[in-house]
Amino acid sequence: MSTITNSIFSPETAARFDRLVTLYPVKRSALVPMLLYAQDEVGYVSDAVVTEIAERLDLLELDVRNVLSYYSMLRTKPAGKYNVQVCTNISCMLRGGYEILDHCKHKLGIGHKEVTADKVFSLEEVECIGACCWAPAMQVNYDFHDNLTTVKVDEILATYRAGQGKDVK
Amino acid sequence: MPTLVSHPDEVKVISRRFGQGAADIDKYIELDGYKAVQKAIAEGPDWIINTMKASGLRGRGGAGFPTGMKWSFVPKQSEKPKYVLVNGDESEPGTCKDHVIFLHDPHAVIEGTMIAGLAIGSKMGFIYLRGEYRYLLKIMEKAVADAYAKGFLGKNIFGSGIDFDIVTQSGAGAYEVGEESALMESLEGKRGVPRIKPPFPAVVGLYGGPTVINNAETIASAPHILLMGGEEYAKIGSERNGGTRLFGISGHVERPGVYELPMGYNLKKAIYDVAGGIKDGKKLKAVVPGGSSCPVLLPEEIDVGLDFDQMGKAGTMLGSGGIVVLDETVSIVEFALRTIAFYQHESCGWCIPCREGTDWIKKTLTRVYNGGGSKKDVANVQYLAENMMGRTFCPLGDAAAMPTLGFVKKFRKEFEDYIEGHKAGTPIITVEQLVGAH
């Protein structure tokens, strides 16, 4: 049973958040992961998400927004159902990261931080994702795809389009 | 999924359970898991710290501070609770070693956290993973839950009368949070900006309590050290640099991967023997030896031992152990621009020299890259970088300035030729891309 009446989250997520705030010496410690998990469910950090999280953590909405604006994974606008994040940092760049990014742009017909018209895909150029030795690499909904080639990217995107891609939220 | 690599020169200490299914707690126990923590309970805090000191283990995050000494700085008596904080916010470009530890040996991180807790008299540990490592966080969460289920965590661990809890935490995308005080801010639910030091975390850290904060690889090394003995561990490495280290070799090599090599192993051998040499038979142009913040080395400078002291003498750093190899086709102007673009993006903006310095270096190098540079630009970039050095609360300012200085000093002629229209290397980035993302 959630401590919040009329929670905007699913019962599972609400229960998870109830538990999360009990783990730390200070409730506010739950803020960063909570924002990310809320985004996973809602698709982005909406005004309603900010309001409920502020209430759960006894914070001002301003406090929440102040933290929200700092972290690069948090967004305040919806992304596609599958968020494609291509790394172009040095190790990936040396092994074709920009080629992979260009290919995704061309294939999906969208640019950096844009969403396809059918809202299935969004694309982001991201900084190092910690897959340097398996470069070039990208993530789709947190799942890593590495040692990429343009052919492999086509297969991965087709798998997601068919609804069979992995989502590790 | 990261592919595991192997080479005969490797000495497998921290990686000895990789690929053996040790994420499963029973398998981990079968492979000597949770023996070290029981030994630590039996022998007591002084023995743990002395063993860690004898091991010569130095912080694997990049700073290379002696771990045993760090643990000994925590006051024995404290009114406020003490904490152990594991830094798994791995985000230095070129670095993916903690990635494989979380994937293949999550219980070693847990056991190491417990050992650090016993050493300093803490009852609570936090394991902080970067937000992008969601699948690894899930592996860690399961490992922690399994350890609780076995009674290894929680009340009265191994019948010692000591309680120890572990909480796993996710970040949400911020390079800066890899800095220890910024990580504590993030864990307290704030923007990840650094704190002014002193006081150091060992005295005033998380929630104002004495805190030991270590890199995940450092923590995961502790169980191995306690089982094999500090002196034995120290012997594997070089002078004042105990043990082994996970080196991630990436970029233009034939066999990129994470290899565990003894400290002091020759960098040239690591590139040419272990990683199979330069990809497609090309010539080596440069090496960024320990993550993107380390000053670049020229081919004639790589006959050097991979430890904190020898790399320091060579004018660079061992850093995070992420060795990035550049072949002859790379444009250093472009590589320097991509490097500073990252730091400009990640600067938290707290300190003006870093915020403004990274931005102006990026702007200047972008102009150079686009063909509109003047000869003065190279001197300007050097001037900006020199004025960032040592003038910020946290090391991000230095991390941006050091590689920039390395590039403009060692490849000055390439920058000047580029400005005059003689461009070396093959450009990869289009201007539109740079404007778009950063």
Image (cartoon, rainbow, N blue to C red):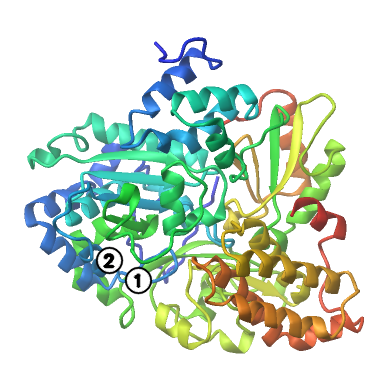
Asked if residue B178 shows in the view, the reply is yes
Please name the residue shown 29% across and 38% down the image: B25
Please name the residue shown 34% across and 70% down the image: B58
Circle 1 sits in a helix, a strand or a loop, which is it?
loop
Residue A138, position as x, y percentages in the image: 66, 46
Q: Mark 2 lies on which chain?
A: B
| Whether residue A148 is situated above or below residue B357 in the rendered picture | above
- Residue B102 falls left or right of residue B400: left
Asked if residue B285 shows in the view, the reply is no
Give the mark nearer the N terminus: 2 vs 1: 1
Going by the numbered disc 1, the residue's amino acid type is Phe
Q: Residues within 10 Å of mark 1 (few under 14, many from 20)?
A: some
Going by the numbered disc 2, the residue's amino acid type is Lys
Residue bearing the label numbered 1: B65
Task: Work out whether disc 2 and disc 1 sit on a shared chain.
Answer: yes
Whether the residues at callouts 2 and 1 have beta carbons within 8 Å, the answer is yes
- Residue B89 falls left or right of residue A167: left
Q: Quadrant of the N terminus of chain B?
A: top right
Residue bearing the label numbered 2: B70
